[in-house]
Image (cartoon, rainbow, N blue to C red):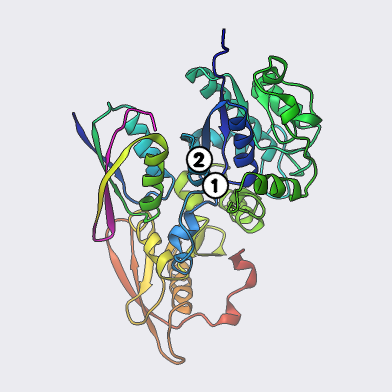
Amino acid sequence: MSRVQVDARRLLCPMPVIRLQNRVNELQPGDEVEITCTDPGALNDIPAWCRINGHAVLGSRRQGNEWIIEVRVGDGDR
Amino acid sequence: MSQPQRKAVALISGGLDSLLAARVMLDQGIHVEGINFYTGFCVEGHTHAIRKKDKAKPKRNNALWSAEQLGIKLHILDIVEEYKEVLLNPQHGYGANMNPCLDCKIFMVQKAQEWMEKHGFDFIITGEVIGQRPMSQRKDTMPVVARESGALDRLLRPLCAKNLSPTLPEREGWVDRDKLFGFSGRSRKPQMELALHYGIEEYAQPSGGCCFLTDESYSRKLVDLWQARGERKYELDDIMLLKVGRHIRPRPHFKLIVGREEGENNFLEGYRKQFIHMYATSHNGPLVLVDGCLDGEADLQLAARLTARYCKVPPGELATIEVNYGDGTQQQLQVVPLPEPEQKLEWTLQ
């Protein structure tokens, strides 16, 4: 299992989702991604993208003006 | 022997029509996955994310929301770079503003066609309705989109299919043509009735589409950008900044981007390293980016006085404006805010 970081700071939605999607497409089920965003819209969009594409949001936290969302890659089936 | 389940890729904009088109296909047992394109000009989300006054509005991405309502996967494609050619050299020209709607539709269907082939899908569906849009959704442009995108008869429009020749999915019996629709015209009533039939009560209703290029003010600012630079080129940051702030061009070689409220000032903060920027240290006021070059003391004074004009400076007081240059140097100017009558109307790009 690997854990990778994705920097989506200063990007407005849907770019953080696209950055996450493109990284997830390179990973294996069970791998984890930690994505850092500054657009609060990502707090809605990333969980929505995960739900419809079969991935799991492990948690999210705020650090100043940044939000960090942890995602576990699913097997592609909802 | 049972037939394999056929697979369709649906162009999902986040509006009602594409939602319904996909729903109609799901009803016929088709496996549907959605595709959504990010051009950089999408209205969706950005201004809500930036402007503080819009913070109360829902920040959801409507394409993701539609996909979730449908229970389908959604793939969002970043086409910012490739889209430049569509906007800069549209073969079919522009609409009322800088919107190359027909070329845009052709390009998106073409990208969907590539995605379809790569992922082993059988056909493409869109929520197009004949007569719904004056440029891209007309009876005579429907075949143009199918032909020039390369999708040909693998492009199915479930909402108006009965007004068009049968496509491959219909002829092969993958979908039942009798259960498709013959909507046409600008009326939204048939779609709203179909939504009611499916129990869909909530959906996005974008007025004027979901693209900034259909917006007159935005288009004017884009053309101004090209004129000022002497070439028709843009980067993603350029087109993002056109969505934010007051744009004032007092001289051909520079313009000011003035934050209108806290959310916009915060957004503009992210561009401080790329632009000369200024703000008042003596009074409350906006962050101002200078796009272009300040050519001499007169330009510097004018920019500083314009910045002061948008600060809360009581009559008779001077404002201290800090100017920050790209090399990290700073300078402070004491200026009288430019009186409103001296700011020419034509300077404001709107």
Q: What's the residue at 43%, 79% (across, down)?
A: B311
Determine whether B282 is above or below B195 in the image. Answer: below
Dot 1 surroundings within 10 Å: few (below 14), some, or many (20 or more)?
many
In the shown orientation, is residue B114 left or right of residue B287?
Answer: right
State whether residue B288 appears in this view: no
Q: Nearer the viewer, residue B178 or B222?
A: B178
Q: Nearer the viewer, residue B74 or B295?
A: B74
Q: Amino acid at mark 1?
A: Phe
Q: Chain of mark 2?
A: B
How many numbered circles does the render carry?
Answer: 2
Picture coordinates of residue B3, whole percent (x, y): 58, 12
Dot 2 surroundings within 10 Å: few (below 14), some, or many (20 or more)?
many
Which label is found at residue B41? 1
Determine whether A42 is above or below B90 in the image. Answer: below
Report the span colored magenta.
A62-78
Q: Chain of mark 1?
A: B
In the shown orientation, is residue B238 left or right of residue B110?
Answer: left
